[in-house]
Image: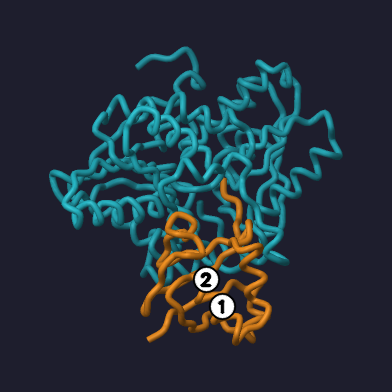
Amino acid sequence: MRFDSLIDSVGRTPLVGLPRLSPSAEVRIWAKLEDRNPTGSIKDRPALWMIEQAEKDGLLSPGCTILEPTSGNTGISLAMSARLKGYRLICVMPENTSEERRQLLRMWGAEIISSPAAGGSNEAVRVAKGLAAENPDWIMLYQYGNPANWRSHYESTAPEILEDLPTITHFVAGLGTTGTLMGVGRYLREHVPGVRIVAAEPRYGELVYGLRNVDEGFIPELYDETVLTTRYSVTSADALARTRELLAAEGIFAGISTGCALHAALGMARKAVQAGERADIVFIVADGGWKYLSTGAYEGTLDEAEDRLEGQLWA
Amino acid sequence: MAIEVRIPTILRTYTDGAKAVDASGATLEELIGDLESRHPGLQARLVDAGKLRRFVNVYLNDEDVRFLGGLGTPVSDGDTVTVLPAVAGG
């Protein structure tokens, strides 16, 4: 495959079968390897779409400053595009994100403003909104509410999946900004009658939920629950176990949020077997495991890894 | 046997600091009513005008009850109900 530049190589990722983790020839599980994007995560798609939409709208021109609240991958994707297109990037990132993500952001030239660990990404969003109000010339792309986020998946991720697997019955992905599920979900619902759209939501340690009260919660503006069939909460213990199982059984070295999605995908597979139905279940490998090595997720016992992950934002 | 209800940090002031409490009922609504009888004030933090509050997520055995039957979702002995505040990802 030949491309004019790195940016042009976003997408067209492989869809690979999981012959060992699939329960039978009738109930098959497939992994969409989004770690094969230029900066190593699915976020290259929404980052590129959001920047190009802002350029079309006349909001961005070379020399402009982009501001974004991000726990890591979106920031890394934006940093690569910003570097190539000549923008300054400031990321607001929770303190409790892995060191690798910070190093990668700095490498591509992004500036990092830390937000408090307690409250997780909710706090990063709050801090970024404050900075945006104080600096009206900065452009906040705002992945949680920017329609170009879900459109990137509607226009690229979803058509790729359907072309590779027209018999798809289930789509499973992690729930963060909700962009992947909204975009792929809407496209598949238009093209595949009865398709099931399943969200796997990471369940973090208590620190991340340490809000002052339940009225200060956060739901991304992009979220439309009618797109989903159902939504599961997956503990860090289950996510870790599945991340390791994916590596051991199928050789795929993925980040921890992938284990979260795989856990829900295996649950769907079990239900299909029990119901005697055929199923082709696609789940998203959002990124590789490289950025999580320092968390100790892949070493020692699962209990030890879970303890080390307590309080970390791993998706 | 009873149904275990896991309580998030911010609501433990209602449960004397307990991380999980037992309750009974045939539906989630009855379960929350039973909780209220022993932990007064909790119901109003979970339910408003007959619906789950916007920023409160409730999971029955890890599945979001909004996709099951909301407050009318049937529950039975041995189930686990988890209450969590809505948080951002990404």
User: What residue does disc 1 label?
Assistant: B33
Disc 1/disc 2 C-alpha distance (Å): 6 Å
Residue drawn at the location 65% of the way across and 15% of the way down: A56
Q: Name the mark on residue B29.
A: 2
Number of callouts = 2
User: Which of the 4 image quarters holds residue A168?
Assistant: top left
Q: In x, y percent, where is residue A224?
A: 54, 42
Can you tell which chain is drawn orange?
B
Q: Is residue A126 visible?
A: yes
Chain under disc 1: B
Residue drawn at the location 23% of the way across and 43% of the way down: A279
Residue drawn at the location 56% of the way across and 81% of the way down: B35
Q: In x, y percent, where is residue A190?
A: 39, 29
- Would you say A311 lies left or right of A288 here? right
**The residue tagged with tag 2: helix, strand or loop?**
helix
Instruction: Find out whether the residues at labels 1 and 2 contact each other: C-beta distance under 8 Å.
Output: yes
Q: Is residue A255 visible?
A: no
Q: Name the mark on residue A243.
A: none
Q: In x, y percent, where is residue A83?
A: 63, 26
Who is closer to the viewer here, B88 or A63?
A: B88
Who is closer to the viewer here, B16 or A51?
A: B16
Looking at the picture, which amino acid does disc 2 mark?
Glu
Q: In x, y percent, where is residue A54?
A: 67, 22
Who is closer to the viewer here, A205 or B57?
A: B57
Colour in which the image shows chain A: cyan
Looking at the picture, which amino acid does disc 1 mark?
Gly
Label 2: few (<14), some (14–19) or many (≥20) C-alpha neighbours in 10 Å: many
Who is closer to the viewer here, A71 or A283?
A: A283
